[in-house]
Image (cartoon, rainbow, N blue to C red):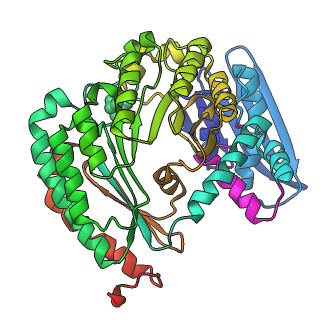
Amino acid sequence: MTLVFDGYPQKYEIEALCRTFFPYRKMQFVYEYHGSVEDDMVLYLRLKPVASGLRFLVVVVDPTTQRAAHITRLERELPRKEIDRQFCLLLFPLLQEVTGIRPKWGILTGIRPVKLIHQYRKEGKTDPEIIALMQRDFLVLPEKATLAMATADHEIKVIESSHSDSFSLYVSIPFCPGRCSYCSFVSQSVEHMAKKIPDYLALLCRELDEIGRLAAGLRLRLETVYIGGGTPTTLSAEQLGRLLGQIERSFDLSHLREYTVEAGRPDTITAEKLRAIYDAGVGRISINPQTFADSVLQVIGRRHSAQDVFDAFALARSVGFSCINMDLIAGLPTDTLESFSHTLDAALELSPENITVHTLTLKRSSTLYQNDRNQFAGGEGDTADMLSLSQQRLIESGYRPYYMYRQKNTLESLENVGYAKAGYEGLYNVFIMDETHSIFAAGAAATTKLVAPNGKIERIFNFKYPDEYQRRFDEILSRKGEIEAFYEAHLPYSVRLQDR
Ligand code: SF4
C-alpha cells in the first residue's frame, strides 16, 4: 500500500495507525504527489491552509471503492501532534470500514497508554473525565481505558517507592535450548553455543565487576536485579552459582528489593539449578508456559509439554520460591478462544504471584513470520477476545494489572499486561517501562539506559551476538566511561561525584 502526504511531510503517527490495521503489509510513502499513484491500496492525506483555517482531507482508494473524509479546523496553525491526531481521527473510521477491524485502543498508538493517564491526573482530571477524554479524543473503548486506569493506579505506587539515587541491574544470558517460532531474539541455540558459554561467562563476570565498581563510585543503590535473556537456566547449576556469586561480590546488595532470574523454559529447569538460584538469594523466578495447550506448544517449536510446566512449578515451590511469574501469549497460531481459556484455567490453578499476558507480535526475522505469515493476513482471529477474557478472569481472581506496554506491528496494537497479586508487583518491569531510574546492563545484546532526574535519557548498547561481545569486549569496557560522564553532566544530582 502507498501513503501519499500532500502538504504535510510527517508520516510517523499516521504510519503507526495504519500498522494497527495492517501490521504486516509493505508500505511505501510518497511526499511529492503528481496526480496519480498505482498500488492495491492508496491513502491520500492532504493538509491545506484555506481562508477559514486548515483543511484536512483523507482519501482511501482500494481496487473496488474509494472512501473520503474531510474537515476544516478554524485554527490557522496547529501543533504537529494535533495535526497528526486530526488526520488519525479522519482515517480511523475509513480503515475500520475497509478492514472490518475496530481497534480497541482507537488512535492511541504509543507504547505506553498508561502515560496518558498519569499526564491527565497531573492536570487534575478526575477518573470519569479521563475515560471520557480517552474515548472522545483518541477513540479508546471504555474497556481499555478502564484497564489503563487500573494499571496506572498500581504502577504509580511502585514508581513512587523507588529511591531517587537508585538503579537496577540487567544481566543478559543470550542462550536458549532451541528457538521458538515467533522469536526474533538474538539468543543462540545452546547446542551450537555450549562450548562458548564458559568464555562468555568469564567476560560477563569482568563486565559485572566493572559496573559494580562504577555504581559504588557513584554511590547508587541497587534496587533490583534481573537476569534474563534468552533463558538463563540454560546455564548449568555450577555456572549459575558462579554468575550469582560474582553479582554478590561486585555489588552492595543490602538495599536490594527484588532479585529475579528468568527460568523461562521448563525444559531447562532442574532441582539443582533452582537450589543454586534460591541459595544465592534470588526471590523471584519466571516459569513461562506461553500456553498450556500441548498442540500449540508443538506448533511454536517449544520442546516441552504442559505437564513439564506443572512439574517445574511444583519443584520451584518445593525449593522455596514464593514469587513466581508466568508468561502467557494470546494469539499463538492454532490457539483458539477455548484453548486459551483452558490455559487461563491452568495458570490460575497453579496460582503464581504474577501472570503476564502478552499479545503475539510477528517479528520479521522469526520463522513464524518467514514461513507462515499469510495465515495472519486476515487478522489474528480471537486475539482481542483472548485479552478481554484474561483481563476479566485475572481481575476476578484477585490479580491486579500493574504494568502495560504495546509493541509495534501487533494487530490492532493490542497490549501486554503484567498482573500481580497484591504486594507481588514485579518492580523491575515497572522501572524499565517507566524509565524511573538507570538500568545498568551487562552481557551480549544488553542496553544500559541512563536516566537523569531532569528526564534526560541516554543509552549504551552492548554488541548483539555473543561472538561479537567476546571479540570486542575491550570496546564494551571502554564505553563504561560514558556512565560517569553522564552522571557528571547531569548534576545537580543527589549523588554528586565530588562528594565521593
Ligand atoms: S525462550 Fe524466549 S528468547 Fe528463547 S527462543 Fe523462546 S521466545 Fe526466544
Q: Mark yes or no: residue 154 visible.
A: yes
Residue drawn at point x = 76 percent, y = 58 percent: 120
Q: Nearer the viewer, residue 374 or 438?
A: 438
Instruction: State left or right for residue 464 relative to residue 54.
Output: left
Q: Is residue 117 magenta?
A: yes
- Is the residue 1 above or below the residue 483 in the image? above
Image position, residue 143 (x, y; %):
76, 35
- Is the residue 290 above or below the residue 474 in the image? above
- Is the residue 374 above or below the residue 452 in the image? above
Instruction: State left or right for residue 227 relative to residue 115.
Output: left
Quadrant containing the C terminus in the rendered view:
bottom left
Quadrant containing the N terminus in the rendered view:
top right
Per the rendered image, the range of residues in magenta is 105-126
- Is the residue 195 above or below the residue 55 in the image? above
Image position, residue 391 (x, y; %):
66, 32
Q: Nearer the viewer, residue 403 or 453?
A: 403
Which quarter of the rendered image does ligand 1 occupy?
top left
Residue drawn at point x = 62 percent, y = 49 percent: 9
Q: In the image as oriented, which residue stretches furthest toward the bottom? A: 498
Q: Nearer the viewer, residue 316 or 24?
A: 316
